[in-house]
Image (tube, rainbow, N blue to C red):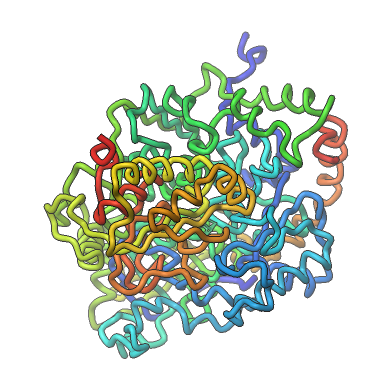
Amino acid sequence: MRGAMTRSAKTLYDKIWDAHVVNEQDGEAILYIDLHLIHEVTTPQAFAGLRAAGRKVRRPDRTLAVADHNIPTEGQALGVDAVADEEARLQLKTLARNVADNGIEFFPMGDIRNGIVHVVGPEQGRTQPGMTIVCGDSHTSTHGAFGALAHGIGTSEVEHVLATQTLRQKKARNMLVRVDGQLGPGVTGKDIALAVIGEIGTAGGTGYVIEFAGQAVRELSMEGRMTLCNLTIEGGAKAGLVAPDEKTFDYILGKPAAPKGAAWDMAVSHWKTFFTDDDAVFDRTIVIDGAALVPMVTWGTSPEDVVPVTGNVPDPESFATPDKRAAAHRALDYMGLTAGQPISDAKIDRVFIGSCTNSRIEDMRAAAAVVQEAFLHGRMVAPHVKAMVVPGSGLVKEQAESEGLDAIFKASGFDWREPGCSMCLAMNPDKLAPQERCASTSNRNFEGRQGRAGRTHLVSPAMAAAAAIAGHLVDVRTLLS
Amino acid sequence: MKAFTRLDGRAAPLELANIDTDQIIPKQFLKTVEREGLAKGLFYDFRFDADGNPIDDFVLNRPEYKGASVLVAGDNFGCGSSREHAPWALMDFGIMCVISTSFADIFFNNCFNNGLLPVIVKPEELAALMDEAKGGNHMVSVDLATQTVVSPSGKTFTFEIDPVRKEKMLKGLDAIGETLQHGGDIDVFESKRAISQPWMEA
Ligand code: SF4
């Protein structure tokens, strides 16, 4: 029999999984965790639980803390004591105390290295291929762009990882999303992601780890891949993955926590073992024609509610099941839109460029390019629109400023802020007023996500910048032509 | 963690798909450092209007569903944010079981870590339960040991559940304590890795 001799073909996910199983019983594995990212909102109860049980943090050196979710985006240099919101202040202080008590590295608010947790991990070189990475935040899937198995966990699981450096997991199924062809101008990783979610639905990925492959994915920058993997959670998947390649290694090289000298070569040869074997079988495969994609925008209150910017708002009665029809009726009512209207007619009040989905340097550049082009044609932010840009970290902010991007934004009427999650979830003072309509580069258009009764349309940074100038949702390609 | 064995209680119907955790517990309630007291924020924007007055026709505000311990909800319940505040808020409110056709992954895990039972039924069974829950009698029984839901009119539905999870839920086991019993295996894993991937230890 040859069978016993042949090595069975594995996917990238299979390989990372196998390399981290500490123990497996009845289909449930104890999986070793290489990197645990933590922030102020989902950890206080976990540290309290540890203290109550007399347990210690097993690997403080494999843990990294930032303050991002509830920090203000102005006046950070004044420190935590100046944060107006008393509950936010308490959470920030609780985190500071917990990390100090446990010897965990922490970039506090105002530190140039601080920022949104999923921007900071890669930027510091903490995120590396083949790793397992978790964080009490669902967009941990972002780190999958490096070929790391990364996903969000709840607070009980945060406590479990702090205490044991492992997580109890059942293996997910494998899905391949292949995006063939070359993306057209003005089409980005964000548009691929929205198109995929529109295709599979917000529950379509449930129970799967998705690997993204194909020419369009390979050609994305690391930033574009991060945006794509970031949004996999909105398709319900456990995690998203892109196999590491030279682009990945180049991105990591020289970052503060990247391996140095001989260790670098050793690490790269290890990382190169993480790819899907040619003959590996996926449980489900989806093929998308990347060349046919156009810029996408959401019309409703779920990320699956997407239309091409050239399209119309759908009719709720066209949905298959009663609960979906009810949800669509409710969404149109909430969003203040009418079935059949061209989505580009929607007049906007606010623009938010930021969040772990789109606040990296490349996102800043893409938005600034549109703004600058418009400026050269004598156009600025539309008078009725309030627009803000929130860089993902202190380092992104510094880089953008050194390239003069802040000046471009400010000259056109954008507000240039300090880093943090900001209006992605509006836990800090940045929020929409009721019924305000916002073109946002974030990841969730849920009811109330950006402020009670606020209306969110998810778009790419270039599309958000274009909307700011046009004053309504608009196809960035027409604005530039 | 709380054990879950059997529950007899009122079922409240919430016929919407994709109810996300931002709706279950909006962000202004996440600024707490405690697990308790989150009931006040449960479905806040459904239960209260902009001035903080109760919205009378929302199902959980209606007198006939007072004290409901089971929620019957549309597909893909609990999607979105990883906040464990969602199951904490549901439980603090008294809801110990949610029945739907599917649940988002992180929410599903969080339920099991707290003793809140998520029950997955078939679409036609959900439709039947939803209809009955809307009617005059909405008492259901959920039995984990036999994996059954008995509807108000006495129809019995069985549901699937992972045997490992079922066992832990029935006994209310502490996951961390259990994993720490494998501390030796974790030590061995780490020492092997320190040799094969030394840069990870730097
Ligand atoms: S930017 Fe938004 S999605 Fe990302 S970590 Fe912050 S709150 Fe979560």
Question: Residue at left 60%, top 24%?
Answer: A245
Q: Quadrant of residue A196?
A: top left
Rendered view: A14 above or below A411: above
- Which image quarter holds the C terminus of chain A? top left
Q: Is residue A237 visible?
A: no
- Which image quarter holds the N terminus of chain A? top right
Number of numbered callouts drawn:
0
Question: Residue at left 28%, top 35%?
Answer: A294
Rendered view: A354 above or below B84: above
Rendered view: B57 above or below B171: below
- Left or right: B90 with respect to B193? left
Question: Residue at left 13%, top 53%?
Answer: A341
The x and y percentages for residue A255 are 72, 38
The x and y percentages for residue A104 are 79, 58
Q: Quadrant of residue A171?
A: top right
In terms of depth relative to the viewer, which is nearer, A439 or A180? A439
The x and y percentages for residue A330 are 23, 66
- Left or right: A139 with respect to B72? right
Question: Residue at left 30%, top 40%?
Answer: A295
In terms of depth relative to the viewer, which is nearer, A319 or A307? A307
- Left or right: A76 with respect to A317? right
- Left or right: A76 with respect to A426? right
The x and y percentages for residue A232 are 46, 44
Q: Is residue A95 visible?
A: yes
